[in-house]
Image (cartoon, helix red, strand yellow):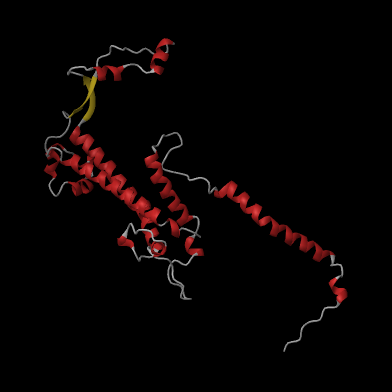
Amino acid sequence: MPEVEKIELEELFKKPSFLKSCWWRVENFFKDWVYPADSLKNALFNRYDLVKMHDIPRTQYSDVLERVFLANMELLVDFMEKENPEKYVVWYKDKYGNEGHKYGEYEHANNIPILFPEYEGKYVMDILKELYHWWKTDYPNLVDEKEILLSFWGRYVSGEMKSKPWEGEVDEDMKERKQLSFWQKTLQFLKIKEYDEEEEFQEIVFDTSECPTSLDDFKDEQVNWEFIDKYLDGDRNNIFVEGFVKGKLDGLKMRIEQEKQKNLHLFVEMRNYLWT
């Protein structure tokens, strides 16, 4: 049995040395400062009370329907990039036999419906990485494709959008919509800007006079055929089939919206596993 060090009673009440006393004071100061220091860091830098949506310029209005989506994607990015989840939590199986959570465990334990059965039993971190990759890579590529196809449709298929005098009958609803707003009347009253309430009604039309009518009218350097061919079903003459390119553009827009909605809800499903 090891000997226990004996401490004289006088030692217990002996005044500590100056250096030891100073060290205790410094040690206690930093121990007591841990919480306020973290609070200050959170207030100045981490800002967990804010979600920065980088895709929305500060001067631009954005509907809630889009902000709901963007806010959740930014939270996903913050979690994956700033909180270092794999550093603090076991997400897979470690050398000690501990195993990370799989989608469905929390739901079964709490009698919550499984909304994505195709993901049941999959490691939560794998799902988060899939969502992160989609947001960082797949989604921007889809948006770029939509813009390229939209530009092609507007320039070579639908033609330039113009306005021309309305040739049909003017009903009361049209007249009511044509009335000047309060601010327009105010500007007119103050002689800042004049408005003609009797101005003729206009309608929007597409001028296709400058659009190509055959493949020979195209200049290859103006068109990204490598991309456009993906949407022409192997025949460039489909450009001249009425509604074909517009249908492809609408289909791409629908695909983007479907993926946004699905991945938004999938990320929300991961909420109960997002802790570090």
Q: Is residue 183 left or right of residue 147?
A: right
Residue 104 spot, x, y in % from top left: 37, 63
Tell me what residue is drawn at x 84 percent, y 67 percent.
17
Q: Is residue 250 left or right of residue 119?
A: left
Residue 189 spot, x, y in % from top left: 42, 10
Q: Hey, which quadrant is residue 249 in on the image? A: top left
Residue 69 spot, x, y in % from top left: 38, 46
Tell me what residue is drawn at x 47 percent, y 44 percent.
52
Nearer to us in this view, 20 or 116: 116
Tell me what residue is drawn at x 47 percent, y 55 percent.
79
Tell me what residue is drawn at x 27 percent, y 13 percent.
199
Placement of the N terminus among the 4 image quadrants: bottom right
Nearer to us in this view, 213 or 63: 63
Residue 242 spot, x, y in % from top left: 13, 37
Q: Is residue 212 left or right of residue 194?
A: left
Q: Hey, which quadrant is residue 16 in on the image? A: bottom right
Farthest residue toward the front? Answer: 111
User: How many tags in the picture?
Assistant: 0
Farthest residue toward the bottom? Answer: 1
